[in-house]
Image (spheres, rainbow, N blue to C red):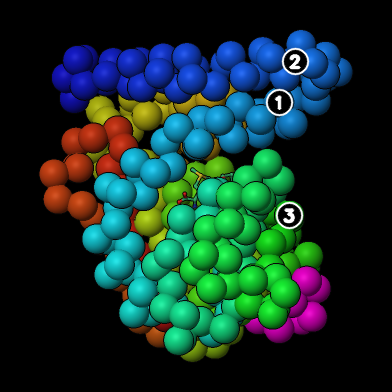
Amino acid sequence: MKLYDALSIIPHLAAVVQHALPPTLRQIWATPRIVFQPLALSRFFMFHVWGMLADGVDQNGRQMKEELITPFASGIVLDLGAGYGHTVNYLDKSRVTKYVALEPNALMYPHIRRIANQAGFTETDGSLLILSCGAEDSTSILSSLNGRRVDTIISILTLCTVPSPEETIHSLANSVLKSGGYFLFYEHVKSDLEDVSWWQSFWAPVWSLAFDGCRMDRPSHVWVDRVRNDEGGEVWKEGKTWGNEGEEKSMFGHKIGRYLKV
Ligand SMILES: C[S@@+](CC[C@H](N)C(=O)[O-])C[C@H]1O[C@@H](n2cnc3c(N)ncnc32)[C@H](O)[C@@H]1O
C-alpha cells in the first residue's frame, strides 16, 4: 500500500473532527459533568459524525442495499445499529411486518422515528420498535419481542462497533434469528492484504475514538461465515460473502453477505 493512500485517512478524520468537535465542546460547556461520562461523550460526538456522513454513505450504497435487503428482508426485521434509520427505506412494506431498530444512541431516535414513519412503520400500530440495548444483549432483544425470534437480521456498518463481536454474532445467529431467517450484512472489514491490514491496525485506535468504538481491523465477514451452533454444527443452510470491485487495496474495503439459517 502506498504511503499516500495510508495517510489519506487523515483528511477524513480532520473533517469529522472539524464537524463534530464544536457541538461537543458546546455540550461540555453546557453540562460539564459529561466529561466524566465517556460513553455519553462518545455517543454525542458520534451523533454529529454520523449526521454529517449518513446520507452520503447511504447514497453510495443504495444499489447494493436494494439488492441485499429489499428482496430478502421479511417478517420481523432487526436492524443492528440503526443509526439515523436509513435501512428502513429498503424494506418492502408488503413483506415486512415489524421494523425493530436497535440503537443504543438515543440521540438518533427522532431521526429513526421520522424516517420509519415516512416509510409506513409506526409505534402506534406496532410495526416499529426502537430498542435501546446493544446488539450484544440478546436477552433484552428477545424479551422486548416477548420471546419471539426475528425473521431477518441486518447489520449495515455496525459489526465493527459491537463489543465481543464473535460472541455477539454467535448469539444473534443462534438465539435471535429464526430458523429459515436471513442474516444480511454490509461491513467494512480487515483486509486480506498484509500491508493494508497493518495500516488498518495502526489507525484503528484513533479511528475508534472518533467513531464511537468502531474498529477498522475486524474480519466480521469471516466471523459470520464461520459461526456454528452450540454443538459445533452448521448454522447456515447457505450463504455467501462478496466484495465491491476495486476496493481490495483500500483500508475501507467492504464485504457484503447474505446467509440463510438452517
Ligand atoms: C456507522 S453507524 C451505522 C448506522 C446505520 N446502520 C447506517 O447504515 O446508517 C454504527 C451504529 O452502530 C451503533 N452502535 C454502537 N454500539 C452498538 C452496539 N453495541 N450495538 C448495536 N449498535 C451499536 C452506533 O450508535 C451507530 O448508530
Q: Position of residue 197 (x, y in %)?
A: 33, 33
Relative to 176, 200 lies left or right: left
Of 133 and 82, the residue lying toward us: 82
Q: CA distance from mark 3 to mark 2?
A: 23 Å
Amino acid type at image mark 1: Leu
Q: Position of residue 172 (x, y in %)?
A: 61, 68
Q: Would you call the spot at circle 1 few (<14 residues within 10 Å), some (14-19), or many (20 or more)?
A: some
Say what secondary structure mark 3 lies in.
loop
Query: In which quarter of the view is residue 10 placed?
Result: top left
Q: CA distance from mark 1 to mark 2?
A: 9 Å
Indicate yes or no whether the magenta region holds residue 4: no
- Give the mark nearest the N terminus, 3 or 1: 1
Of 120 and 245, the residue lying toward us: 120
Q: Residue under circle 2?
A: 28
Residue at the spot x=57%, y=16% of the render? 21
Amino acid type at image mark 2: Ile
Q: Residue under circle 3?
A: 132
Q: Residue under circle 1?
A: 41
